Image: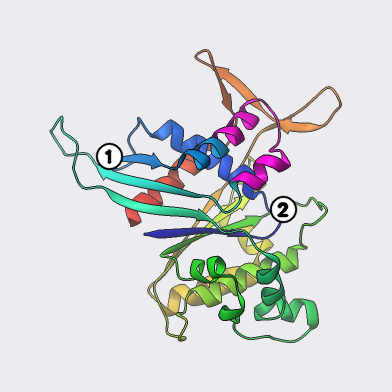
Amino acid sequence: MNVSIIGTPRCGRTVFLGLLYETLIRMTTAVCEDDQEVIVNTGPLETKAFGDLRLELLSGRWPSARNRSKVSGCSLDLGFRRKRSFSFFRSSELRTVKLRDVPLSEKDLKVMRGSGQLREVLQGSAGGSVDRYGLSELFRDSLESDAIVLLADVSNEHQEGSWSGEERDAFLATIVDNAAKTRLGRTREVTFIIVLTKADRAEADDQKVFDESYPRTSKALREVISERNSASEILVSWLGTVSDPNAVKVPATTVREGQVQIEYSEKEYRRLVCIIGKMA
């Protein structure tokens, strides 16, 4: 099974990948909600890249440009295995998932901005479907994944290189519209997992926050789910912060049982891994 991670520039992608990897490390010796084991299998380069990213967060530092570059486009090979009831032996059946980060290249950016709902936002006219053959091979293939993790930045901050809220909404809506169809335009089954990035710890109503921040995407999801055999989930990605001596916000850490740990929405990330495992 293939799962793609897609988001706009500066949406919190690298921090999301670091927290996901942290969660997978914690879960490798634990059981999931329905007694599933998860196994992480990556190559030496990916293992070092994700490991360095994790260490930065554990040290209370934001990901460096070097580590952002290293993990961009990387994939994680996950294996899920259900434990047998009333047995000390593990099940031999291993269900595999390739979880891949899909960065937006300049080529993809040009195509996306010229078609779909993004064109309507930027140029004032509807652009229709995305020209898939104008996209990079990686991005084109990601639209045919079994599940797509959409990173939806719900913060109010305006960083250099980030997109406006309206552009982000139109981009994700365009992804939903096109991923729910094959290259030949036929409808297909796909699961969309919305992750609210840069969220507040006290988000009381995930669905309401998403609907208000991403009205186009929310509408597109409702139409896809009602017309096709598709599904969606919403999760919250929260990372605690503290002020350093220079009054700059940095990742918060805490010490538990003698170990330094990142303060983040671990339960939500565990839920994400379990959702993927159940789909496999």
Identity of the residue furthest to the front in this view: 44
The picture places residue 197, in percent across and down from the top left corner, at: 63, 49
Residue 35 got which mark? 1
Residue for point 63% across, 57% down: 152
Rendered position, 240 above or below 77: above
Q: Is residue 199 visible?
A: no
At label 2, the amino acid type is Arg
Front-lying residue, 230 or 188: 188
The picture places residue 95, in percent across and down from the top left corner, at: 29, 51
Q: Does the magenta-highlighted stretch encompass residue 199?
A: no
Residue 51 got which mark? none
At label 1, the amino acid type is Asp
Question: Which quadrant of the figure contains the N terminus?
Answer: bottom left
Q: Which residue is mark 2?
A: 10
Question: Which quadrant of the figure contains the C terminus?
Answer: bottom left
Q: Does the magenta-highlighted stretch encompass residue 53?
A: yes
Front-lying residue, 14 or 250: 14
Residue for point 29% across, 43% down: 34
Identity of the residue furthest to the top in this view: 258
Front-lying residue, 19 or 103: 103
In front: label 2 or label 1: 2
